[in-house]
Image: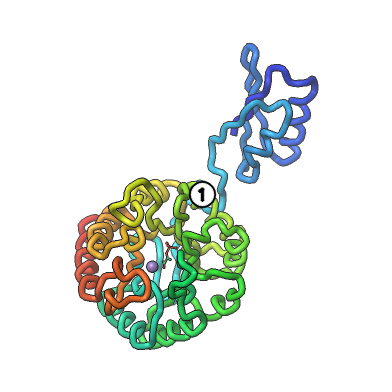
Amino acid sequence: MIAILKQDRTDGSAEQLYKVLTARGIIVQEIKGESTLMFGLAGDTSNIDVDELARFECVDSVIRVSEPYKLASKKFHPEDTVIDVAGHKIGGAGNFAVIAGPCSVESEEQILSVARDVKAAGATFMRGGAFKPRTSPYAFSGLGLDGLELLKMAREKTGLPIVTEIMSADYLDAFAEDVDVIQIGARNMQNFTLLRQVGALNKPVLLKRGLSSTLEELLMAAEHVMAGGTRKVALCERGIRTFETATRNTLDLSAVPVLKAKTHLPVIIDPSHATGYWHLVEPMALAATACGADGLIIEVHNHPEAALCDGAQSVTPQVFRRIMGKVAKIREAIA
Ligand code: PEP
Ligand code: MN
């Protein structure tokens, strides 16, 4: 971090800033030009805010040269994080997580049928929303706690761990008890209170990128979850808002190599919410695999045309099986 000081600062103000920073354990290097003075800050600057420095009267501008996150940073933790849920892994060389299932849990028959089919095709986790964020307050918003019960039943029958979204802190206890990987949806990526509370459960978390969030904001959200307590966080790119209307969102596949250079956390791609159309799920799932994603989350429905949520982007179990076959070939080719 570099603080550039004003030329017309009041006497003693630079010394005052120097004292404040060194008292916080920061190493301050003075860089003097003919008429300029800059402070180069070294050490752990992750808990120093640009705004905090800019508040000093003598500071003209501040430039960040290292990331504002630490727990999520590869610099502080070079080894890849591997999340292990009873032998089902997310992250780490050689592991590829496939989370599959319907957008929402609708009935016992539906979740059992889809869970069995995706397991047979090679999925390693099952998904299914019990609490759904819906744009319209009149749309189906999930079965709630009854949906969690159905997910538990499907887990018992298939052995697949449950990935499902938490919407409210009211259900922290239920999720701590019943859910294997707690999903934080795009709409809650910056609900910092919820991030902390979920982090404090010390459980695996799948954190989805906000609709219009930068990758740095996603990493800062992960930092919030980790500051809450857990170290088991996986990131999910699920498409971002752009001017393009041909797809529901725009899949930012470059997020994979960019994030993997910056963080040790696994990166999962969601081609379903990213594209909004079932026929685009396969090509994007294959591209995600080829570019080094640690896994996929895919919406699968036994009757997409009758789905209560996101039917247009849900693939059938048959298509899912075909995607899995091609994903396996790509993984072999790039291994
Ligand atoms: C979902 O996975 O069901 C979901 C609502 O996703 P997102 O938060 O990415 O929109
Ligand atoms: Mn969905």
Snapshot quadrant of residue 33: top right
Residue at 27% from the left image edge and 57% from the top image edge: 284
In the rendered view of the protein, which quadrant contains the C terminus? bottom left
Image spot of residue 139 (x, y percent): 44, 72
Q: Please, is residue 65 above or below residue 118 in the view?
A: above
- Residue 249 or residue 121, whichever sits in front: 249
Q: Can I make out residue 167 in this image?
A: yes
* 35 versus 298 height, above or below: above
Amino acid on which disc 1 is placed: Glu
Residue ID for mark 1: 217
Left or right: 328 with respect to 298?
Answer: left
Other-residue count near label 1 (Cα within 10 Å), few / some / many at <14 / 14–19 / ≥20: some
Residue 335 visible in this rendered orientation of the protein? no
View extreme (front): residue: 138
Is 251 situated left or right of 224 in this image?
Answer: left
Tell me where residue 303 sits by quadrant. Answer: bottom left
Farthest-out residue, top? 34
Task: Give the secondary structure at mark 1.
Answer: helix
Ligand 1 under 8 Å from disc 1 Cβ: no
Residue 32 image offset from top left, x and y in percent: 64, 18
- Closer to us: 183 or 327: 183
Q: Give the image location of residue 91, x and y in percent.
A: 40, 62
In the picture, the quarter occupied by the N terminus is top right
80 to 127, vertically: above or below: above
